[in-house]
Amino acid sequence: MAETHMINGSAVDKRNDLNDLSSKEWIQETKSFFYQKGLGAGSSEAKYEKMHPAPFSFTDITKLIRFFTKQKGKVLDPFLGVGSTIKACLELDRDGYGVELSPKWCEISKQRLAAESNHVIDNEHLVCGDSRNLKQYFEKDFFDFIVTSPPYWNILDKKDHKAKERVLNGHDTKYSESENDLGNIEKYEKFLDDLTGIFLSCHEILKPGKYMCIIVSDFRHKSEFYPFHSDLLNKLIDKRQKIFFQLKGIKILIQNAKKLFPYRYPFSYVENIHHQYILILQKKK
Ligand SMILES: C[S@@+](CC[C@H](N)C(=O)[O-])C[C@H]1O[C@@H](n2cnc3c(N)ncnc32)[C@H](O)[C@@H]1O
């Protein structure tokens, strides 16, 4: 029998230097899928999440942070949005950091963390800037875990029914007007290259042996289907570019509560994309 010690009520194997989970909890989290768990529209905590055009639920992020870090571990989200990752870190006693380009979302993150987590965040932990400059903001081998959901190219800026719904609800249909915003890049290839450059910097500021999870979805643009998750992956684990992330798995986040739309019925197959991919990458030891 392996020796264990008690951490927050869990019997943790003494050899486990990744997280604070018991063997049973660890194994449960290795399933290749899970169901998205939103807060529910009526939840008072959904107020700030709803302001942003594409937030992720901090409850989903909590699962990943619990698996990939120990208490006090340093966690970065390079596309912070309205602060969901830092909020999850505060709840789990992790040291959360974020970078966000738009001053509007930085300000809303600050308000959210003060209102929901009673926490005043400093400029070292919330950098209002461009993630292309990550290596100027943070030291090499600094983070225990990086988790994020980047812009999905410029798909927010469409004139479709989802955009109309956002406008009707008084929500933004773009992250910002900045030319540095990855969501405002015109060409898909340039967008992929810039995003790959940012994830390469993430590789440098992540500690050896530690993990990065990227949450992405495939999408359609002008009736063309873009397999974004595999396009990105091909760039990130391309050996010729000497990018040394190792792909450790792809978890499917099932969004079973999303509304179904009868796109192109009864003429052709157009998918209701109701899942996201969590790309799980590890920096070599
Ligand atoms: C998909 S959203 C992330 C939402 C976040 N997960 C949340 O729960 O709020 C992507 C974010 O990336 C930001 N962004 C776009 N380009 C950026 C850049 N170059 N540097 C840093 N942030 C950027 C956008 O303003 C947007 O808030």
Image: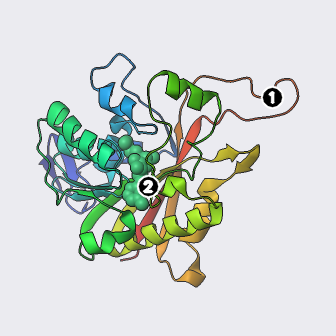
Q: Is residue 208 above or below residue 150?
A: below
Left or right, 279 with respect to 72, comes to right
* Residue in the foreground of this view, choosing between 43 and 70: 43
Residue plotted at (23% across, 75% down)? 139
Q: Residue 85 at x, y = what percent?
A: 30, 46
Q: Is residue 35 above or below residue 154?
A: above
Residue plotted at (36% across, 47% down)? 64
Q: Quadrant of residue 42?
A: top left
Q: Quadrant of residue 274?
A: top right
Q: Amino acid at mark 1?
A: Arg
Which is more foreground, mark 2 or mark 1?
Answer: 2
Give the numbered dot on residue 178.
2
Q: Amino acid at mark 2?
A: Ser
Q: Is residue 167 above or below residue 147?
A: above
Q: Is residue 132 visible?
A: yes
Distance from mark 1 CB to nearest ligand 1 atom below 8 Å: no
Distance from mark 2 CB to nearest ligand 1 atom below 8 Å: yes
Q: Is residue 171 above or below residue 80?
A: above
Left or right, 238 with respect to 125, comes to right
Q: Is residue 22 visible?
A: no
